[in-house]
Image: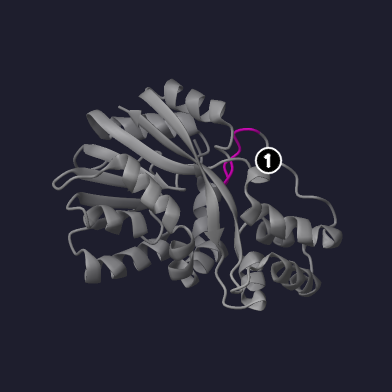
Amino acid sequence: MDNTAQIDYWNGAAGRKWVRDADRLDKMLRPFLDGVLAAAKPVAGESVTDIGCGAGALSLAVAGKGAVATGVDVSEPLIAVARRRAAVNAPGTRFVVADAADWTPEQPANLVVSRFGVMFFADPVAAFANIRKGASPGGRLVFACWRPLAENEWALAPILAAMPFLREPPKPPEPGTPGPFAFGPREHIERVLTDSGWTGIQISPWDGLIELPGATASETADFMLEIGPLSRAIAEQGLDAVKIRDALVARVQDLADAEGRTRLKAATWIVEASA
């Protein structure tokens, strides 16, 4: 199992963008953090592992419930942010730069959680088998992952607005390819978790609206250019972002509500299982 490409990605420009926008992204993604917490119900004293913890928002929320949290992520820049946050808000929370696909916790976790951090493994079955080994017998797993791109307006709308400027439409990834929408098909999640030894699998849909960052159409358009599938398409095709930005600004103006907020449809799975 070779996660080198993802490790390089999250320690490069992508990681730096997420560091820069950590507060704004955490605000946008707060509904899913709340969804994971509601399903996981962490309690005081529990040992909790947060997979793909990023800047640590979920780990710190778990710690706020009295649990003992360890966040794991391959991105050194994001872990640095998480450690700074923890020093202020939850000094007992630990953050580790490691690949959860082959990392072993110091003590078994009663609960394993993740907010969009589990879709990037080169070999997800092997990765989830290793994560299960790091859980206590009967330990719980709860994570949020995106449903298919076509169901997520927040990610699809920028691509559609930019389509006239793309050399070719972004190619759908091959099934099982690591990426934000890798766990879109419900049956893929079931297969991965079953094959890696997890039981009691429950997969529930979450549908709602999320508010994209930006106080103005221009700011929201800039966010769309930097974060999400469109940013990767622009980089891969070597496109001039200036014309695309103008199209995005116009589209955001159409999508914004009376208060100037851009709130778009989001679709995820909340997944639960037992070790």
Residue drawn at 32 percent across, 31 percent down: 132
Q: Residue at x 76, y 71 (%)?
A: 250
The answer to which image quadrant residue 177 occupies is top right
Q: Quadrant of residue 14?
A: bottom right
> Horizontal and vertical percent for residue 35?
39, 47
Please check the rendered image and state whether residue 78 is part of the magenta-colored stretch, yes or no.
Answer: no
Q: Would residue 74 be seen by someone viewing this image from the given angle? A: no
Amino acid on which the number 1 mark rests in the picture: Pro
Magenta part of the chain: 175-181
Taking the spot 55% from the left edge, 69% from the top edge, the residue there is 213
In which quadrant will I find the C terminus? top left
Q: What x and y, as percent, mark residue 192?
A: 48, 27
Q: Tag 1: Cα neighbours inside 10 Å, few (<14), some, or many (≥20)?
A: few
Tell me if residue 176 is in the magenta stretch. Answer: yes
Q: Is residue 129 above or below residue 64?
A: above
Query: For the point 75% across and 44% down, which residue is it?
Result: 171
Q: Nearer the viewer, residue 5 or 206?
A: 206
**Position above or below: 90 against 34:** below
Q: Identify the residue at the far left of this view.
A: 45
Q: Residue furthest front?
A: 258
Left or right: 79 in relation to 260: left
Q: Which of 108 and 90 lies nearest the eye of the viewer?
A: 90
Q: Locate residue 235, reporting x and y percent.
A: 71, 61
Residue 13 visible to an observer of this rendering = yes
- Colour pattern of the rendering: one colour
Predominant SS of the magenta segment: loop
Secondary structure under tag 1 reads: loop
The residue that mark 1 highlights is 173
Is 269 positioned to the left or the right of 60 in the image? right
Between 260 and 242, which is closer to the camera in this rendering? Answer: 260
